[in-house]
Each structure stands twice: as structure tokens, then as C-alpha cells.
Image (spheres, rainbow, N blue to C red):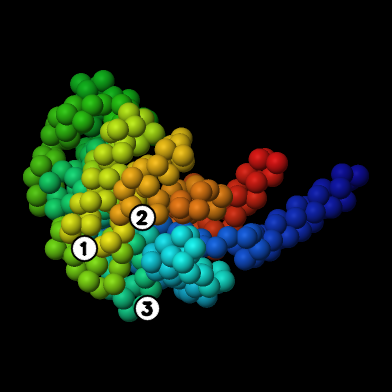
Amino acid sequence: MATTPKRALKRVWSTTTRTAIKALLRDCHRKLPRDVVGVFYHAIGDHPMPHVQHLYFPIPTAVFREDLDFLQTDFRVVAYEDVHNARLGKGILPPHAAHLSFDDGYRECFTVVRPILKARGIPATFFVTAEFVGNSRLFARNLISLAVDRLHSMPAEERLALLARASLPQDPAEWKEALARLPEESLKAFLHKTGIDPEAWLAENKPFLNEEEIRSLHISGFTIGAHGLTHRKLSGLPPEEAEREIIESCAYVRDITGQKAVPFAFPHSGHGIDRKWLYDVRQRNPFVGLFFDTKGMVNDASWVVQRIWAERPQWRNAKSFAPLADIVGAACRDAVLERLHAK
Ligand SMILES: [Zn+2]
């Protein structure tokens, strides 16, 4: 048929293009001028984590070890202090520097991540949210994940009746969004109806770090950062409220650890927060360290470190995790596109 050679040519062309793009991306992080590449996670572990696994997929330790192999081969993993000094013009980072960090302060930072990093001599920063430390409160997103998890494990008939009574959609794909629209008290009440008492679950499972573990991480040489008092998105708050979230959470970490400078990672993201306003907040409060955001490898102010979220499963396949090299490659592509778009 006349179209066959055309189709064959098309196939060869697309395969060649894909291979060429992959080869370009593989080395992209070395070519894109960047003093440090930030990489961050939330939860690492091989055990079930019903409070997070319907938000994103916790990274199994074998995958995490492969990620670290990649980081240690392609990058020089540096401590927060090195990044801090370099960004303030008091030091120079080695070529291909990377910095590793963990948000939200889950217990696994101490029980799973700490021993793996210590054995390899890899530095990292752990960002903790003041209200969650010591397990005095469960994050609203954890409540959503717990509810979704419980709904999946309920007998179908019971689940359908419960969803109908609560005026929630029957389609599992819509649960998360529908639950996220509920006020926290209604979410807790719904969780009770599924058979989970959120307060009892929190007391029994203790999903977050306590102050003793935070102190111990700091003594082991890791940096502790702040991640807000309440994990609210700062861009939606009045300026004085947003400033309080930054300063008081940094002061809280300073008081636990004795660190002179406390870095701050924006809860959710720092998108939409005026950098000039942030600059002034830092000037007024010199103990606030660098800010950490989540926009991959795009450029920002010198005192804002952008980071790549390393916890994405491969598209449409929850069981298979994209290698960190591919995630870094994709972040690199996005940064190049953003740069072109800005021109
Ligand atoms: Zn967070």
C-alpha cells in the first residue's frame, strides 16, 4: 500500500525524535546553568500509609535508594549551610550541586529516611509544620486520604448507602475533590461515620515527628526548616497573617534546635507571593533563612531555592515509579520552556 512507507518513515522519525529528546533531557540538568538543583519528597517507606497514599504515592525504600544512587552519581549533594552561604555570596557551591529536602515532618523522616541518609553521608533538610509536631493535630489532607482509603475497603453496599446519606458522589474518581470541599469538622464527622475516630487514629498512629526526634535529627547533622504554623497556603492570607506563619514557625524551629538560621518551605507552593514583600520579611527577621519553593528548576530570587517534587508515579501507573533522572529531565524541559516563553 502506498501509505506503508509513509507510515514506516513516520514511525522511524518519531522514534528517532523521542530518542534524541530523551538524550537531550538526560544531560539537560548539566547544561542548564543552575547553582543547585533542589529535590524534595514527603513520605518514604514500605509500609501502608493510608493518611498520605491517596494524595501522592509514598516512595518505597528500594526506589528511594535508586534515586540516591542517581543523585550521588550525577550530582554533588550539599548541605543547607552550603546553599545558604553560596546564595548570600559567602561561599561557592561545587559544580552540579543538589540539595535534598523533605516536607511536612512525617515520622518516617526519622525512622526510615534518617538511617538511609546517615549510612551514605548525605545531608538534607527536614521542613516541619509547627501544629503537626508531636501529633497534636492531623492535617486536613490526611483526613481526606484516610476517608478515601476507608471507602475503598468498605463493603460496596455499605459504602453506597453512606455516600448517598452524605450527598457525596459514588464515583471514586470524584471522592477526593468532593471531600476537599467539606469544612474540617464535617470531614471529621464523615470519617467517624466510616468507622474511624480521627483523634484516636492520630493518638495510635502518631504520623508526625515529635520535638525529641527533631532535636535528634538536628544533632545528627541534618538541618531543620519551618513549613508554617498551620500549613495554610500563604498567598491566600492577609500579609500580617502570612508573615506570622513564616516568623513564628521559624522561631519555633530555632527554639527547638538552636539553629541560627531557619529555612522556610512554602506550604503548598510559594506561587503568587510577592518576592519584594518576602525580601522585606527577611530583612526584618534575619534569623529567617532561605525560602524553598516547588516550581522545579525555574529561576527565582537568589534567596529562593526552587525544588523538584520527586514523588510522582509514572503517568497512569501507580505501581511504577518514574526514575528520578526522568523527573529531573522533565523539570529541566519545563524550565527551558518557561525561559523561552519569558523572552
Ligand atoms: Zn507541605
Position above or below: 89 against 333: below
**Which residue is located at x 91 percent, y 44 percent?**
2
Position above or below: 91 against 9: below
Q: Which element is circle 3 on?
A: helix
Tag 1 or tag 2, which sits nearer the N-term?
1
Q: Which element is circle 2 on?
A: strand
Q: Residue 231's spot in the image, x, y percent?
A: 28, 41
Q: Amino acid at mark 1?
A: Gly
The residue closer to the viewer here, 288 or 342, is 288
Q: Is mark 1 within 8 Å of ligand 1?
A: no
Q: Is residue 129 visible?
A: no
Q: Is the N terminus in the top left, top right, bottom left or bottom right quadrant?
A: top right
Closer mark to the observer between disc 1 and disc 3? 1
Tag 3 or tag 2, which sits nearer the N-term?
3
| Distance Cα–Cα, label 2 vs label 1 | 14 Å
Q: Is the C terminus in the top left, top right, bottom left or bottom right quadrant?
A: top right
User: Dot 1 corresponds to which residue?
Assistant: 258
Q: Which element is circle 1 on?
A: loop
Marks 2 and 3: CB-CB under 8 Å?
A: no
